[in-house]
């Protein structure tokens, strides 16, 4: 069985994230594999651990630095990687990105695609559905567990008051949540082994896509303006010198509609 796991290189959430002059996310800052995609890699690797002859391919779209996302997945245990890297991709929105990924997935011919619940930069959470529409495959979203039995994949989806099990025939798309299990940390053996694993680099032309349908010209959305995050405001201090502190605290909670 071949599993493709989608991995995205995103700016480090602990740093200062900004936009460039053309309205795109500034990816020249320190970045890393999206934390939510680590859960997708982990679920793919668990299936590989439990099965026979399971290949896990890490797939990403992005600039040169996006190769670091594949590198991390390989260190965790993925078999190989594919990096779609092309200047024509710059400015592509989620719709165009889904077209690129769908074309790459079609070329890879996997049995299963696993992705995170969303990215930590765009936080849209729609890629599984978009790929399902483009590929004509069923999509099982927000799985807390993933299991494959024969030609069927199933997930457990946890809600606020109940859980449900959903299944579909392969090939299929699955997205997993951050409750699906802690992602493994690369061992020294895994880090050294990753250096010898194959990584292919594909262009838009390799996928048979028209560059005119990508980038800013092909985008369905546009950024009109951006502004920096406002500075953090000082907190309100209530001095309880005369016993009125409790009342002032309740008033603060009520005014902010926190209770």
Image (cartoon, rainbow, N blue to C red):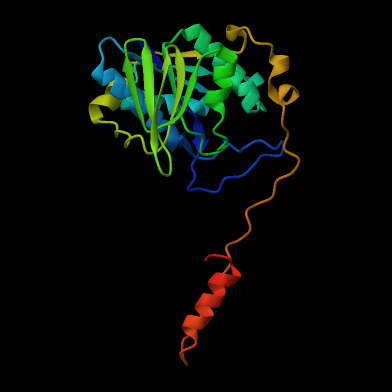
The residue shown at (65%, 41%) is 19
Look at the picture and state if 206 lies above or below 142: above
Seen in the picture, residue 35 relative to 69 is either above or below; the reply is below
Indicate left or right for 60 with 94 as reference.
Answer: left
User: How many numbered badges does the structure rendering display?
Assistant: 0
Q: State which quarter of the image contains the N terminus.
A: top left
239 sits to left or right of 49? right
Tell me the quarter of the picture where residue 251 sits.
bottom right
Q: Residue at x 75, y 23 (%)?
A: 217
Percent position of residue 137, x then y = 51, 14
Residue 250 position, x and y percent, is 51, 76
The picture quadrant where one finds residue 206 is top right
Image spot of residue 132 (x, y percent): 54, 18
Tell me if I can see residue 62 in this picture. no
Would you place residue 230 above or below residue 58 in this image?
Answer: below
Q: Nearer the viewer, residue 194 or 100?
A: 100
Find residue 69 and report its image quarter: top left
On screen, residue 195 above or below 107: below
Query: Which residue appears at 76% of the width and 40% of the height?
Result: 224
- Along the viewing direction, whichever of 203 and 168 lies nearer the viewer: 168
Query: What residue appears at the point 28 percent right and 9 percent down from the top-left corner?
Result: 53
Could you say which is closer to the camera, residue 6 or residue 229? 6
Q: Residue 88: x, y in percent?
A: 66, 19
Along the horizontal axis of the image, is 235 left or right of 216? left
What is the residue that sits farthest to the bottom in this orientation?
242
Query: Nearest the camera: 59 or 145?
Result: 145
Whether residue 254 is visible, yes or no, is: yes
């Amino acid at each position: 069985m071949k599993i493709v796991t989608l991995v995205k290189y995103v700016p480090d959430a602990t740093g200062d994230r900004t936009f460039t002059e053309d309205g795109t996310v500034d990816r020249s800052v320190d970045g890393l594999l999206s934390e939510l995609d680590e859960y997708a890699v982990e679920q793919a690797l668990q299936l590989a651990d439990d099965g026979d002859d399971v290949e896990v391919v890490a797939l990403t779209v992005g600039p040169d630095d996006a190769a670091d996302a594949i590198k991390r997945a390989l260190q965790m245990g993925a078999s190989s990687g594919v990096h779609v890297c092309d200047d024509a991709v710059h400015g592509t929105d989620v719709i165009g990105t889904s077209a690129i990924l769908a074309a790459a997935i079609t070329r890879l011919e996997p049995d299963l695609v696993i992705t995170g619940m969303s990215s930590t930069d765009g936080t849209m959470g729609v890629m599984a559905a978009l790929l399902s529409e483009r590929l004509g495959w069923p999509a099982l979203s927000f799985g807390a567990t993933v299991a494959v039995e024969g030609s069927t994949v199933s997930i457990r989806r946890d809600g606020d008051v109940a859980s449900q099990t959903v299944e579909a025939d392969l090939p299929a798309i699955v997205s997993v949540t951050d409750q699906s299990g802690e992602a493994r940390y690369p061992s020294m053996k895994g880090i050294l082994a990753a250096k010898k694993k194959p990584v292919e680099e594909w262009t838009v032309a390799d996928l048979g896509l028209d560059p005119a349908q990508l980038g800013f010209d092909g985008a369905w959305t546009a950024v009109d303006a951006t502004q920096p995050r406002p500075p953090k405001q000082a907190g309100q201090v209530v001095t309880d010198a005369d016993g009125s502190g409790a009342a002032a605290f309740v008033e603060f909670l009520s005014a902010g509609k926190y209770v």
